[in-house]
Amino acid sequence: MIPVKVLAVRYLANAAPALCRQLGAPEGYPSLGLLTTDCDDATYIALDAATKAAQVQVAYARSFYAGAANATTPFAGEVIGILAAQTPGAVRSGMEAALAELERVGFEDAAGVPYLAHTVSSVGTFLAKEAGVRLGSALAYLIAPPLEGMYAMDAALKAADVTLCKLYAPPSETNFGGGLLAGTQSACDAACAAFADAVAEIAASPVER
């Protein structure tokens, strides 16, 4: 696994109401936790994990253009995530859960081609909303470079009884592509395995004759 670098973390115990409103924090959630890392998709999974571990909501989460390798400043990285909670203690608990998840989740490397093929066994509020599924559903979170991502998505969809909930058609902000698939945990695992195999196939022989 390619380790995720946490670049910056800050807390606002009682953020300005106007800022909370503009960021999309729920009413009565003035405590914010801000996070940047060098990996957007792993961070989205980590933010979702935070919603399962503490009374927090994801107020804001966006990827930055061109990816971490082209970050404009030392601590910008590839993504910003902002958690919101009713109390400073809750937002810290959520952030701690997110940081712990970032130690377990990351991209893999297939002969120089990075990809993410990760089963979220039980989604929290953030990914449930993103995928349009019920809280607690299993999801396959699949991301790869543009061509690899679309080719491997086809393999994943054909390998298991899964539903395409969200397609991230390339280019994304970071010039990758992929999607979210829903199914049983075993079906999501099978889809992830097929996705990984398809990416590795292209990495080994990129031009089909």
Image (spheres, grey):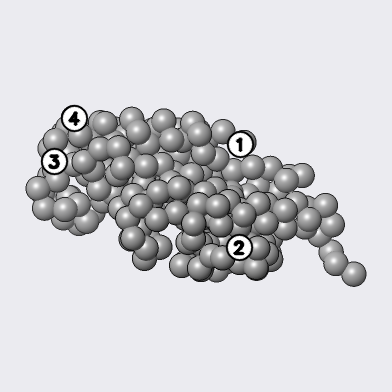
Q: Residue at x 37, y 36 (%)?
A: 98
Mark closest to the chain's N terminus, 1 or 4? 1
Residue that numbered label 3 is attached to: 86
State the quadrant of the C terminus: bottom right
Above or below: residue 171 compared with residue 110: below
Answer yes or no: is residue 199 visible: no
User: Mark 1 to mark 2: distance in Å?
Assistant: 26 Å
Judging by the rendered image, the residue that carries numbered circle 2 is 160
Q: Earlier in the sequence, mark 2 or mark 4?
A: 4
**Mark nearer the viewer, 3 or 2:** 2
Q: Residues within 10 Å of mark 3 (few under 14, many from 20)?
A: some
**Residue 109 or residue 185, whichever sits in front:** 185
Say what secondary structure mark 3 lies in. Answer: loop
Q: What's the amino acid at mark 3? A: Gln
Residue 2, label in figure: 1
| Marks 3/4: CA–CA distance | 9 Å
Q: Position of residue 29 (x, y in %)?
A: 14, 45
Q: CA distance from mark 3 to mark 2?
A: 41 Å
Tell me the CA gap for discs 2 and 4: 41 Å
Task: Give the amino acid type for the residue marked by disc 4 in the picture.
Answer: Gly
- The label on residue 20 is none
Q: Give the structural element (helix, strand or loop) at label 2.
A: loop
Q: How far apart in space, not on screen, are marks 3 and 1 (Cα)?
A: 34 Å
> Which disc, if any, is residue 89?
4
Q: Look at the picture and state if 43 lies above or below 4.
A: below
Residue in view at x 35 percent, y 52 percent? 136
Q: Is residue 29 left or right of residue 209?
A: left
